[in-house]
Structure formats: structure tokens, C-alpha cells
Image: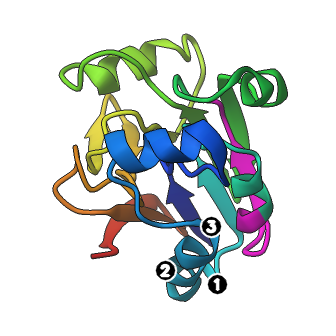
């Protein structure tokens, strides 16, 4: 099974949030151009995980073109998204339990902090975002996976997304969009 993983898209259709995304995050994409970038990578995915900082619910609608979407709210998401999406969730895909969370605070120690938000849960993987930096490491038997940011040209070295492969084991890969 192939799962697309994306985070920190920060795409707003218009208004002050779009201006802020362009200035502060150096986001030049819009939903249509992002969809075209994702097409070759997500077209055969069975599901999509978004790890927060969507900024607008139109992102979910676009991602639904690729398959079922599992998403959480991030720290930069407006109240409407925080009222619609949970801050954490667990999904079962194939035989694997995957925790989803955005994250918070400094990049150092982020994987430890997000892991602590799932106390007592038997998870195979935790997908998270926030740092805009790709990360894939097995920690205490859990694959900690951050896809990076698909749109950030300011804080991230490259724009990236992730793919989780669920077969006899769960493993992830990062794909550069630049």
C-alpha cells in the first residue's frame, strides 16, 4: 500500500493569509500548481496524510482528488480548521497503526515531543510536520516520519513530500519537488 504524506503547505486561496504565505513562507504555488506537482507522486496512492498547517480547507478538497485524506490541524491553521480537524489522530491502514500530529516548538527534540502525545498507544509510525525538514528515523520501534514542506522556500533546504510504503513492514521515503 502506498500512502502520500504532506505537511506545512500554508496555501490560502486569497486575502491576507495568501499575502502572508507569500511574504513569510516564500510560497509561490497555488492549489492548481501544487496539484500538478503532486500528480506524478500521489496519483496511485491509496490514501493521503496531511500533517497540519493547511491554512485553508480547500487544501483537503484538492487532496481528495488523490484518495481518502487523513489530516490534523497545525499551529498556523485558523480557528475554522482547528474546529474541523483534530490536533492528533490515529489511523489504521493495512496492518499498521499510524499516529498523525503537527508538532510545535523548536526543531530540536521535535520527534520526542510528538511521540509523547501518544502515551500508551501501540503505533508503528508517527507522521508529523512543523519543522519543514524531512525526517525519517526509527525511534523506540516507531518510524518517526516528517515529509518536510511541499511549498516552503524559506526555512526548508528543498521542497519535499513523503511516501509511506506499507507492505511486510512500514518504511518511508522523501521526494524532492524542486
Q: Is residue 48 above or below residue 129?
A: below
Percent across and percent down for residue 74 are 56, 29
User: Is label 2 in contact with label 3 (beta carbons under 8 Å)?
Assistant: no
Percent across and percent down for residue 171 are 40, 60
Residue nearest the observer in this picture, 44 or 98: 44
Q: Which mark is residue 31?
A: 3
> Which of labels 3 and 1 is toward the front?
3
Q: Residue at x 28, y 51 (%)?
A: 134
Q: Secondary structure at mark 1?
A: loop
In the rendered image, is residue 51 in sight? no
Q: Which mark is residue 43?
A: 1
Q: Pick the quarter of the image with the C terminus.
A: bottom left
Percent across and percent down for residue 30 are 56, 66
Please tell me which of labels 2 and 3 falls first in the chain: 3
Q: Secondary structure at mark 2?
A: helix
68 in magenta: yes
Task: In the displayed orientation, state which residue is furthest to the bottom.
Answer: 40
What's the CA distance linking mark 3 and mark 1? 16 Å
Residue nearest the observer in this picture, 120 or 113: 113
Q: Pick the quarter of the image with the N terminus.
A: bottom right
Q: Which mark is residue 37?
A: 2
Q: Residues within 10 Å of mark 3 (few under 14, many from 20)?
A: some
Residue nearest the observer in this picture, 95 or 18: 18
Q: Residue at x 65, y 51 (%)?
A: 14
Q: Is residue 178 above or below residue 7?
A: below
137 in magenta: no
Q: What range of the chain is rendered magenta?
A: 62-73
Quarter of the figure with residue 47: bottom right
In the rendered image, is residue 87 in sight? yes
Q: Secondary structure at mark 3?
A: helix
Amino acid at each position: 500500500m502506498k500512502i502520500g504524506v504532506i505537511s506545512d503547505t500554508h496555501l490560502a486561496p486569497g486575502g491576507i493569509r495568501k499575502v502572508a504565505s507569500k511574504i513569510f513562507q516564500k510560497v509561490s504555488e497555488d492549489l492548481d500548481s501544487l496539484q500538478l506537482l503532486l500528480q506524478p507522486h500521489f496519483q496511485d496512492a491509496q490514501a493521503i496524510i496531511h500533517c497540519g498547517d493547511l491554512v485553508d480547507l480547500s487544501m483537503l478538497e484538492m487532496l481528495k482528488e488523490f484518495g481518502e485524506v487523513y489530516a490534523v490541524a497545525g499551529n498556523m491553521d485558523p480557528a475554522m480548521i482547528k474546529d474541523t480537524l483534530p490536533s492528533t489522530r490515529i489511523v489504521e491502514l493495512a496492518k499498521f497503526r499510524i499516529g498523525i500530529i503537527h508538532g510545535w516548538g523548536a526543531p530540536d527534540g521535535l520527534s520526542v515531543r510528538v511521540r509523547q502525545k501518544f502515551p500508551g498507544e501501540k503505533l508503528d509510525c508517527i507522521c508529523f510536520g512543523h519543522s519543514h525538514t524531512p525526517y525519517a528515523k526509527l525511534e523506540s520501534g516507531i518510524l518517526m516520519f516528517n515529509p518536510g514542506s511541499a511549498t516552503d522556500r524559506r526555512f526548508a533546504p528543498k521542497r519535499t513530500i513523503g511516501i509511506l510504503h506499507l507492505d511486510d513492514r512500514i518504511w518511508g521515503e522523501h521526494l524532492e519537488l524542486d
